Amino acid sequence: DGGITQSPKYLFRKEGQNVTLSCEQNLNHDAMYWYRQDPGQGLRLIYYSQIVNDFQKGDIAEGYSVSREKKESFPLTVTSAQKNPTAFYLCASSPFLIRDVSYEQYFGPGTRLTVT
Amino acid sequence: ILNVEQSPQSLHVQEGDSTNFTCSFPSSNFYALHWYRWETAKSPEALFVMTLNGDEKKKGRISATLNTKEGYSYLYIKGSQPEDSATYLCAFPPSESGGSNYKLTFGKGTLLTVNP
């Protein structure tokens, strides 16, 4: 089945440690995204990538880093510089067939990160 | 960051009731509006992507309308069922994104609970 996988589902880390969240898709989508959800807030965009080896900062990129070495994979690293890393993280992907056309996004199941 | 408002924040209805909720967005430089359904313990899934003023889309008992001139979209659920219980999110690309979906701005969502 085509879809997006995120692992692990739950992740616990000590403060000061970097942690990498995995996101893989087999939908052959060019664009991929990372969002963060906090209680009482909408999904906020962290980083996005339109094509392999290229990515852009979203609205809350500080303290995060990404890479896009393969079309299928878009890992997110939460660094020790992120002041409030405890949150629910969602990865998504979408086609990029025609610029200026808005395509629906397909989401993974999410990773809940807790940093203590 | 654009201001996307959804109301109400939460809603409780009885099975069989019809219901609707609202997404408000800035009406200038409109490109598209997305609706997503997010059930507990599942991934958000796209319901509709709407692009034209006056657009009306339907999927089963769920339908949506769009008014780009006044900046709102309604989502309707006819004959609500317990399985409709979910958070309904709306989102749209800000004008500086060139209309592409790369920088979707999400509302906080409407949490619908359908009681049997």
Image (cartoon, coloured by chain):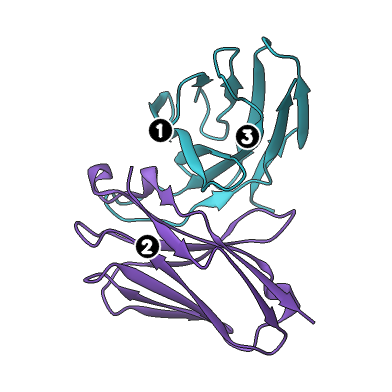
Q: Is residue A105 above or below residue B69?
A: above
Q: Where is mark 1, residue-wise?
A: A58
* Helix, strand or loop at mark 3: strand
Q: Which residue lies most toward the top here? A: A16
Which residue occupies 51% across, 18% down? A63
The residues bearing labels 1 and 3 have C-alpha atoms spaced at a distance of 17 Å
Q: Residues within 10 Å of mark 1 (few under 14, many from 20)?
A: some
**Residue at mark 2 shares a chain with residue at mark 3:** no
Q: Residues within 10 Å of mark 3 (few under 14, many from 20)?
A: many
Residue B86 on image: x %, y %: 66, 65
Residue B55 on image: x %, y %: 33, 78
Picture quadrant of residue B14: bottom right
Q: Amino acid at mark 2?
A: Leu
Give the numbered dot on residue B33. 2
Q: Amino acid at mark 3?
A: Cys
Closer to the chain start, of discs 1 and 3, is 3
In the rendered picture, chain B carries what hue? purple
Which residue occupies 49% across, 25% down? A68
Q: Amino acid at mark 1?
A: Gly
Residue at mark 2: chain: B
Residue at mark 3: chain: A
The residue closer to the viewer here, B93 or A67, is B93
Q: Are marks 1 and 2 in contact (CB under 8 Å)?
A: no
Q: Where is mark 3, residue-wise?
A: A23
